[in-house]
Image (cartoon, coloured by chain):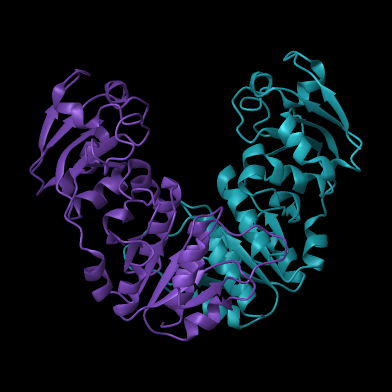
Chain colours: A cyan, B purple
């Protein structure tokens, strides 16, 4: 059982993992970053506790820690209980979800391991927005994507905001860097995947046609503004498009991904 | 041609339509609201100028107003040019898009008019989040939805943040209130639509099956947390679900809508 520890001291050094979340640790994966994973709110904290990420501690108001008691039964870490005011002082902003957990990073499978056990993967290039990355993992988890490979220029899926927007699904959909970029796509192809690049280009095949071909598919997705680089597009086996109304901007990248994930799943169901 | 007017006076009363945007006018459609429509950024301002909403004025830094010159050729309203600093003082925050337009509301078609000329409509209940409403209109515009009907508890699509997130598509996808709620759904049915309620319920038919039935479809969508009310669900002709992985939270409402819009469009293409 987690050890319940009450504290009303905003300077308590045992709370340092939770300190100044809005300013520190913007890229925890980079040198100098703390490398910690933060979960916010009972739903995401539960998902963290059920994941492979080893928890270090929780911090929350009494009501939220109480709600999590069943999830904490086998978790031998401290759960710090304090007031909403002290919590806001430590964290640096008012947190209306009322509970946080912090964990260390877990060892991740590499790209080849993910590919070996997957039917559909997403491969991202230049998706640098933390909310888009988070939303994309949420959609991947819901719609049967087995893993995510990160090409050049992607944001860290384990950044706090990505974890929150993903509803904790970054903690359960496996991901790995795909390097070098874009020649790493050869490894994807060598693993038996067709690389399908999503693009608004009119000469691309429709999503429905490409999904109907079946087989293992790596869906290549670019950033919302500029889209995929020419190098990445050239490395794909097929260009695929979502039919859209004339004169409308393309969809948000996570939304376009959801439509494509859905179609790729529907093709086998 | 718009009349270019330079001003460096943050108190200039001619700029009052643009004043304190972050605090005023949260529900401009309600009594006491100013009833104005605000567009931010060149892309959305262009869409506003191309819409039925009568523009009143623009406010922007020189570079952005210059970019819009071709769009302003036939628009007989003042375009106030000022510095980024004065603009921030007037608006109440720093606006990195650099240009705003303000318009009056345009007369909207009513629900029956929209229904008469549509094949697919979205009908919303309790979608109270401005970003979700905006994203939903963006997805509707991209994926062939002809109109949006607003049941009880929906946010105003013309609120500033909704306009921005929609990329201006709230200005071109027609929408109307559907009252009374939910019995107004009878009018939808009387117009020849099948009302299909999107729900995570396991006993619902799959989206693919329902789309394959063809015909005019009104897709009924509820809010992200609680979903549709029992009354709305009971008023539908068919319950429809997006097949999802076990144990995953449902998709964001705008994302789920995008998947459904896509499938309803694909069924006829």
- Comparing A263 with A72, the one in front is A72
Q: Quadrant of residue B78?
A: top left
Q: Residue at x 59, y 83 (%)?
A: A212
Q: Number of callouts in the render?
A: 0
- Comparing B246 with B139, the one in front is B246
Residue B148, position as x, y percentages in the image: 34, 63
The quadrant of the image that shows the N terminus of chain A is top right
Q: Is residue B21 visible?
A: yes
Question: Is A249 placed left or right of A21 in the picture?
Answer: left
The quadrant of the image that shows the C terminus of chain A is bottom right
Question: Is A263 placed left or right of A172 in the picture?
Answer: left
Q: Residue furthest bottom?
A: B213
Residue B87, position as x, y percentages in the image: 28, 25
Vertical order, B132 against B263 (above or below): above
Residue A139, position as x, y percentages in the image: 61, 59
Vertical order, B92 against B191 (above or below): above
Residue A84, position as x, y percentages in the image: 65, 24
Q: Is residue A155 visible?
A: no
């Amino acid at each position: 059982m987690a050890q319940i520890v009450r504290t009303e001291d905003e300077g308590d050094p045992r709370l340092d993992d939770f300190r100044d979340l809005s300013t520190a640790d913007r890229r925890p994966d980079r040198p100098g970053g703390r490398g910690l994973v933060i979960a916010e709110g009972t739903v995401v904290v539960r998902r963290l506790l059920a994941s492979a990420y080893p928890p270090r501690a929780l911090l929350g108001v009494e009501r939220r820690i109480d709600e999590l008691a069943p999830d904490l039964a086998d978790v031998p870490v401290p759960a710090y209980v304090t007031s909403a005011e002290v919590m806001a002082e430590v964290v640096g902003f008012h947190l209306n979800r009322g509970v946080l957990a912090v964990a260390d990073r877990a060892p991740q499978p590499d790209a080849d391991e993910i590919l070996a056990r997957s039917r559909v993967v997403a491969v991202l290039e230049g998706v640098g927005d933390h909310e888009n990355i988070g939303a994309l993992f949420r959609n991947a988890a819901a719609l049967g994507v087995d893993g995510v490979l990160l090409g050049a220029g992607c944001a860290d899926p384990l950044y706090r905001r990505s974890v929150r927007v993903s509803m904790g699904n970054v903690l359960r959909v496996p991901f790995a860097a795909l390097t070098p970029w874009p020649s790493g796509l050869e490894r994807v192809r060598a693993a038996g995947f067709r690389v399908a690049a999503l693009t608004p280009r009119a000469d691309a095949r429709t999503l429905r046609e490409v999904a109907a071909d079946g087989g293992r598919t790596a869906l290549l997705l670019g950033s919302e503004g500029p889209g995929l680089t020419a190098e990445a597009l050239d490395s794909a086996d097929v260009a695929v498009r979502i039919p859209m109304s004339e004169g409308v901007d393309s969809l948000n990248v996570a939304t376009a991904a959801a439509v494509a994930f859905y179609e790729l799943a529907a093709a086998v169901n």
